[in-house]
Amino acid sequence: MKQLLLAVFAALLFSTSLQAQERREIKPKDNMRAQQQQVGKQLNLTDSQKVQRKAVQEDFQKKMQELEKNESITVREYRDRKEALLKARKQDMEKMLSAEQKNKLTQMKAAETAKKEEQFAKHLDKMKKDLVLTDAQVTQLKIQRENVKKQMMALKENEAMTREQKKAQMTELKKEAKSAHDKIFTEAQLKKIDERKKKRPDQQSAK
């Protein structure tokens, strides 16, 4: 979730999802247009706004293409510049929205979050049945998930840290989260989880 709330606006409104791609990869334009049309309908964009959106998107794509061709910069410089372009695009798109549309977008993001929470609840319920988890274990899993979410959000919003520092901290946070997560289960439950992970590739190839 690369990548839970920070990418919601871009994913909903602009569709290129460049933050989740490799350095030299850009999403197909037809996919981008399809998603733009869908979100545009939900936000009920005016003809004038559609023109503005198109201009902002084309300007962004032009700058991204120029950045892609620049072989004289480091990977870190590339990522920093791309992040700046994404941030500028988001701000430009937000400026063209009315108060009502911004409220609608907030509702859409809230609905997306609610959907993810519902999926997690279903996953946890299935895990409880399959692994015969106790109520205490279920509570621990919920608490741990909320704690990790808060720590990740705080890390992403920390403007005092460099991208490399954030990356290192995020890696460490994930390791600590996995270790704490594993401690919640019994040895028998961990063994069952491991067995299912090993079977998963075979199940996917059989489909």
Image (cartoon, rainbow, N blue to C red):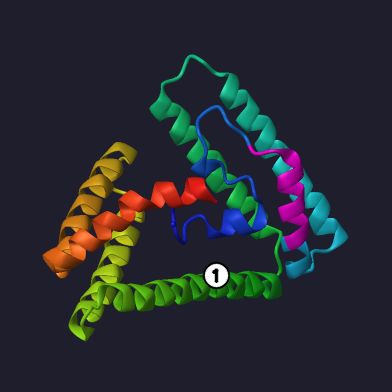
Q: Residue at x 20, y 77 (%)?
A: 137
In this orientation, which residue lies closer to the viewer: 147 or 191? 191
Q: Quadrant of residue 148?
A: bottom left
Q: Residues within 10 Å of mark 1 (few under 14, many from 20)?
A: some
* Rendering quarter of residue 18: top right
**174 falls in the magenta region:** no
Identify which residue is drawn at 69% across, 31% down: 62
**Magenta stretch encompasses residue 30:** yes
Q: Nearer the viewer, residue 13 or 188?
A: 188
Q: Is residue 35 above or below residue 68?
A: below
Q: Is residue 43 above or below residue 133?
A: above
Can you give x and y, in whole percent of width and height, for residue 12 in the image?
63, 59
Residue 13 locus on image (x, y percent) = 66, 57
Does residue 27 appear in the picture of this structure? yes
Q: Which residues are magenta?
A: 27-38
Judge left or right: residue 111 versus residue 134. Answer: right
